[in-house]
Amino acid sequence: MDEIAPEYDVVVLGTGLTECILSGVLSVKGKKILHLDRNDIYGGESASVNLETLFKKYQPGSAASEPWKKYGRANDWNIDLVPKLLMSNGELTNILVSTDVTRYIEFKQVAGSYVQQGNGARATVAKVPSDAGEALRSPLMGLFEKRRARNFLNWVAAFDEANPSTHNGEAALTSTSVSQVS
């Protein structure tokens, strides 16, 4: 292993997506980076853990019985600690590609998102609705919430930026940069 250099241009603390992008951008610009994380997993608030780590973290004492083994190999599962949404054709995607971060991560389309409700023995898992039919069947929302969700999903599905008749009275979508907000 190479020796650790005595000097760096930048020290980045944490391995969340923001910190990794920052390190990548600075590295591409020729800066010498020291990237550290106090946690034993990468990703900071955006971390994903394998099934074994998930059981050990949220069911202390379960390590002896190895309950994750009944689900297959632990590394076949990566569970996001915080759900994420990334537009496939957005600015963040362009940044990830330009900084070569995509050499270290892989994106896949998933069939659905699920949430846990409650804790311990009373915990249940429910699918997050992704269309009008699922919204109506979901136990996550009450009747009025289901109606609003159905209307919203139908509006999104029919929306055409070039066709004002699909806007339903909503203002035209515009882009706002971070500098305009802050």
Image (cartoon, grey):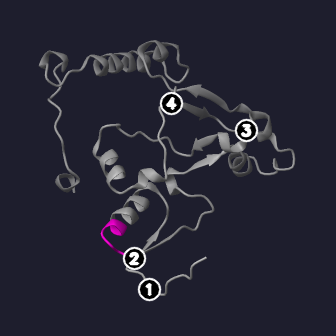
What amino acid type should be assigned to the residue bearing mark 1?
Glu
Based on the displayed image, in which of its 4 quarters is residue 131 positioned? Answer: top left
CA–CA distance between discs 2 and 3? Answer: 46 Å
Based on the displayed image, in which of its 4 quarters is residue 119 positioned? Answer: top right
Dot in front, 2 or 3: 2
CA–CA distance between discs 3 and 4? Answer: 27 Å
What span is in magenta? 26-31
What amino acid type should be assigned to the residue bearing mark 4?
Val
Compare marks 2 and 3 and give the one earlier in the sequence: 2
Query: Which residue is disc 3 drawn over?
Result: 120
Horizontal side, residue 80 vs residue 19: left or right: right
Dot in front, 3 or 4: 4
CA–CA distance between discs 2 and 1? Answer: 8 Å
Q: Position of residue 109 (x, y in %)?
A: 47, 32
What amino acid type should be assigned to the residue bearing mark 3?
Gly
Compare marks 4 and 1 and give the one earlier in the sequence: 1
Q: For mark 2, does the 10 Å Cα neighbourhood hold few (<14), some (14 to 19), or many (20 or more) residues? A: some
Query: Which residue is disc 1 drawn over?
Result: 7
Which element carries disc 3, helix, strand or loop? helix
> Is 41 within the magenta?
no
CA–CA distance between discs 2 and 4? Answer: 36 Å
Dot in front, 3 or 1: 1
- With respect to residue 127, does 50 lie above or below? below
Which element carries disc 1, helix, strand or loop? loop
